Amino acid sequence: MLASLLSVDVSLMVQRTRRNVVLYAIAALFLLTAYGAGVGALAVWLTSMMSAAAALGVVAALSLSIALVVLLVVMVKNRADERRRREAAANNRALLMTTAVSLLPVMMKSRPLMAAAVTGGIALFALRMLGGSGDETGAPDA
């Protein structure tokens, strides 16, 4: 009974997703058509004030400047996200160290836990020495 209930929910979700994809594709098509018509109308309007070549140059320069502004915003946002990710990683490391120090008295009483902690520490040290830290700090900023 539970399986039939879940299959109904999944089939409804698949139908809704398909419908949304088709409707969004149609909306995107008309949005692109409106954008193209708007750019064309701007070029035609500008030709009434200047030559056709100059009007198309103005439209191209305007489009290029808008694209550059958008790319600049994306780069600034990506850098801010990367900085937040690094800060969160540093906070997680600090929390992990605090937890490890607070558990140290418990591990000192148990030989198996102490052996596991020492083995893990040696493995972490070896991993760091071999350069496989897993933290991509050397990645270029884009």
Image: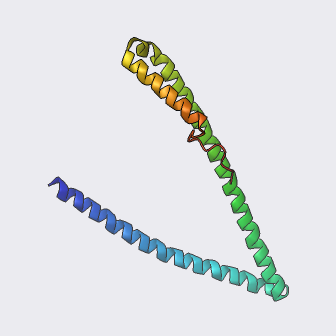
Q: Quadrant of residue 56?
A: bottom right
Front residue of this view, candidates 91 and 31? 91
Front residue of this view, candidates 93 and 107? 107
Residue 90, percent across and down?
A: 59, 33
Inspect this view and state whether residue 131 appears.
yes
Quadrant assignment for the C terminus = bottom right
Above or below, comparing residue 62 to residue 42 in the picture = above
Above or below, comparing residue 54 to residue 135 in the picture = below
Left or right? Give the position of 21 relative to 8.
Answer: right
Q: Quadrant of residue 105?
A: top left
Above or below, comparing residue 83 to residue 126 in the picture = below
Residue 115, percent across and down?
A: 42, 20
Number of on-image labels: 0
Residue at the image position 58 percent from the left and 77 percent from the top = 32
Colour treatment of the image: rainbow
Quadrant assignment for the N terminus = bottom left
Residue 57, percent across and down?
A: 81, 80
Front residue of this view, candidates 91 and 68? 91
Residue 104, percent across and down?
A: 47, 16
Residue at the image position 45 percent from the left and 23 percent from the top = 117
Left or right? Give the position of 11 relative to 74.
Answer: left
Q: Quadrant of residue 43?
A: bottom right
Front residue of this view, candidates 119 and 141? 119
Residue at the image position 66 percent from the left and 56 percent from the top = 74
Inspect this view and state whether residue 92 appears.
no
Above or below, comparing residue 4 to residue 45 in the picture = above
